[in-house]
Amino acid sequence: MRDAAQCRPCVELCVAERKAKPKISKDDVEKLSRGQATTSRSGSRATPHRLTQKERILFESAKKHGFLKIPLTGARVNVENIYLKWCEASGVTPVIIRAED
């Protein structure tokens, strides 16, 4: 049986060899929001990303002002998903404001 000290170099080597997830670009985020395929192969079929016209207006406003304001009705989780991806691509901290009653 191997000692833990003998296995450690193998574990470190395996971790170092893992490929890092490619960073998504702003162009890829725009493509995702329109339902198109991305070059970085990011996005998941299980996670909704395609935006409606109203959601697109909210997203464009969020990019301009630096925060996403979600109204009580009319916005799905898609807007949040795209905004979070855009913040990741931009290197900006996401700020999401939810309207309350």
Image: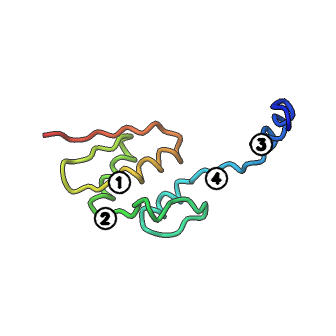
Give me the disc on residue 1: none
Q: Secondary structure at mark 4?
A: loop
Dividing the image into 4 quarters, which one contains the C terminus?
Answer: top left
Q: Quadrant of the N terminus?
A: top right
> Would you name the residue on which mark 2 appears?
52
Nearer the observer: mark 2 or 3; the answer is: 3
Residue 88 point in image, percent of width and height: 51, 45
Q: Residue furthest bottom?
A: 36
Percent position of residue 63, x then y: 40, 47
- The secondary structure type at the circle numbered 3 is helix
Residue that label 1 marks: 79
CA distance separating discs 2 and 1 = 9 Å
Check the image and report above or below for 56 versus 1. Answer: below
Please state if 81 lies on the left or on the right of 14 as rendered. Answer: left
Query: Which structural element holds mark 2?
Result: loop
Q: Residue furthest front?
A: 1
What amino acid is labelled 2 in the image?
Thr
Q: Nearer the viewer, mark 2 or mark 4?
A: 4
Which mark sits nearer the N-terminus, 2 or 1? 2
Which one is in front in this view, the residue at disc 3 or the one at disc 1?
3
**Are discs 1 and 4 less than 8 Å apart at CB?**
no
Q: How is the image coloured?
A: rainbow
Disc 4 crowd, CA 10 A, few/some/many (<14, 14-19, 20+):
few
Amino acid type, label 4: Pro
Of the numbered discs 2 and 3, the one sitting upstream in the chain is: 3
> Which residue is at 42% across, 66% downward?
34
User: Where does the image place residue 100, in percent across and percent down from the top left?
Assistant: 17, 39
Q: Quadrant of residue 40?
A: bottom right
